[in-house]
Amino acid sequence: MARAPGDNQTDAQPSGSSGYRAKLNPIASEIRGKRVLLVDDSIVRGNTSKAIIEMIRECGAKKVYFASYSPPLRHPCVYGIDMQTKTEFVAQDADEAAVARRIGADKVIYQSLDNLKKVVKAAATFASRQRSSAVV
């Protein structure tokens, strides 16, 4: 899939909105008959995910898997970041199979919270070592 020139991010729009079609250009000849893995930073309401999955299916994908490198988002941010209310989260009170059904994927794969913590700790350790070795 290719983004339109100059596009940095897809804005959250209701499912079925034509905005996705203007910003994302799936190449049907590359998708037809294949199993496709889509990866995004998170799945919040599921509108964007659902619309993109529909586009990929229209191109003839055999299976569509959706991976998020964040754990399931189920609660609003308590630090004041503008996030939806709890009832708007697609993963609220839902397991991976239920989220997959809601967004139209064959399977949803989330990063586990434990693995995310491990990666953040490892990155912090690496960055600390880089700063220490750079100081002469």
Image (cartoon, rainbow, N blue to C red):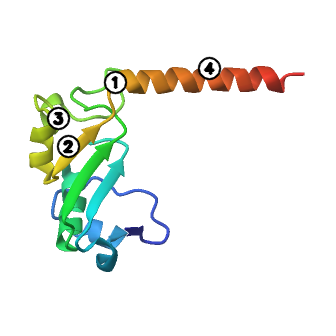
Say which residue label 3 marks: 91
Cα distance in 3D space between marks 1 and 3: 14 Å
Q: Which mark is residue 45?
A: 2
Looking at the rendering, in which quadrant would you find the N terminus? bottom left
Say which residue label 4 marks: 125
Mark 3 surroundings within 10 Å by alpha-carbon count, few (fewer than 14), some (14 through 19), many (20 or more): many
Mark 1 surroundings within 10 Å by alpha-carbon count, few (fewer than 14), some (14 through 19), many (20 or more): few
Could you say where residue 110 lies in the image, as x and y percent from the top left? 28, 36
Residue 64 in view here: yes
In front of the other: 86 or 103: 103
Q: Earlier in the sequence, mark 1 or mark 3?
A: 3
Give the residue drawn at x 26%, y 42%: 43
Residue type at mark 3?
Ala
**Element type where label 4 sits in the image:** helix
Q: Earlier in the sequence, mark 3 or mark 2?
A: 2
Cα distance in 3D space between marks 1 and 4: 18 Å
In front of the other: 61 or 84: 61
Q: Earlier in the sequence, mark 4 or mark 3?
A: 3
Q: Earlier in the sequence, mark 4 or mark 2?
A: 2
Could you say where residue 15 lies in the image, as x and y percent from the top left? 16, 58
Residue depth check, mark 4 versus mark 3: number of the one nearer the observer: 4
Give the residue drawn at x 10%, y 47%: 102
Taking the image as shown, residue 120 lies to the left or right of residue 107, namely right
